[in-house]
Image (cartoon, helix red, strand yellow):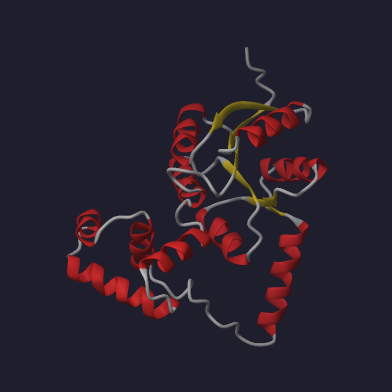
Amino acid sequence: MANAGLRRIIIAEDHTILREGLRALLAGMGGVQVVGEAVDGHQAIRLAQDLGPDLVLLDLSLPRINGMEAIREIKRGDPQVRILVLTVHKAEDYVYAALDAGADGYVLKDTCSADLFQAIRCVLAGERFLSPAIASTLVDLFLGSRRGPAPVSAFDSLSGREREVLKLLAEGLRTRAIGDFLCISPRTVEKHRANLMEKLDLHSLPALTRYAIEKGLVMP
């Protein structure tokens, strides 16, 4: 029988050894209980809906549905569930995207167990938590912005629809299939693809695919 006093956690991590290691680590933390484990984004969403956890510890590089989309869907289903990202991605684009999607904390996988425990406690207490290295980078960026406007990145310049088209192109869908999926004409899809190539200065489908993988829109 589950202890009602324990905070319930789901681990979403596709690497078995890492997932098992996290489960063993959390077993020694005290005050928490791992109630579910997901190996992909789709399963993470379903378990969050079925189990109603207090916190989801989630990797961004998940198969089927990537971590960014999983965060959005989990939060859409239950805005109260807390989400702590545990990832290798240090680039600010990933941090901004994860927080914008609804993540409550962002921790790097090279963190020590004490910092991970602190992150979990902070997020469960309703606070936000960023790995020290991530927080330092964001402070530097903020201070830099005080000295002058930062240039808009190519990725930030993309519209929501352009990002959708980029994701579907990288997943291997053809023009007509993308049009059917998004309820737009093939000509409009081609226009979005041309805009993507111009804005990103990438002029082939393999280059667009590599870019989408780098940005976490699709799994390699």
Residue 141, quarter of picture: bottom right
Rendered view: 204 above or below 65? below
Q: Residue at point 73% right, 28% down?
A: 24
In this picture, is 51 found above or below 107?
A: above
Q: Residue at x 33, y 77 (%)?
A: 195
Give the percent coordinates (x, y) of residue 58: 59, 43
Q: Could you tell me residue 121's position as x and y percent?
A: 73, 40
The answer to whether residue 155 is left or right of residue 6 is left
Query: Residue pushed farthest top?
Result: 1
- List the single residue furthest toward the bottom: 148
Residue drawn at (18%, 65%) of the image = 186
Left or right: where 116 falls relative to 198: right
Q: Is residue 91 left or right of residue 168?
A: right
Q: Indicate the quadrant containing the N terminus: top left, top right, bottom left or bottom right.
A: top right
Depth check, front residue: 206 or 59: 206
In this rendering, the answer to whether 75 lies above or below 162 is above
Count of numbered circles on the image: 0
Q: What percent of the width, then of the height, locates residue 132?
A: 77, 58
- In the picture, measured across the screen, residue 102 lies left or right of residue 141, that is left
- Quarter-wise, where is residue 165 in the image? bottom left
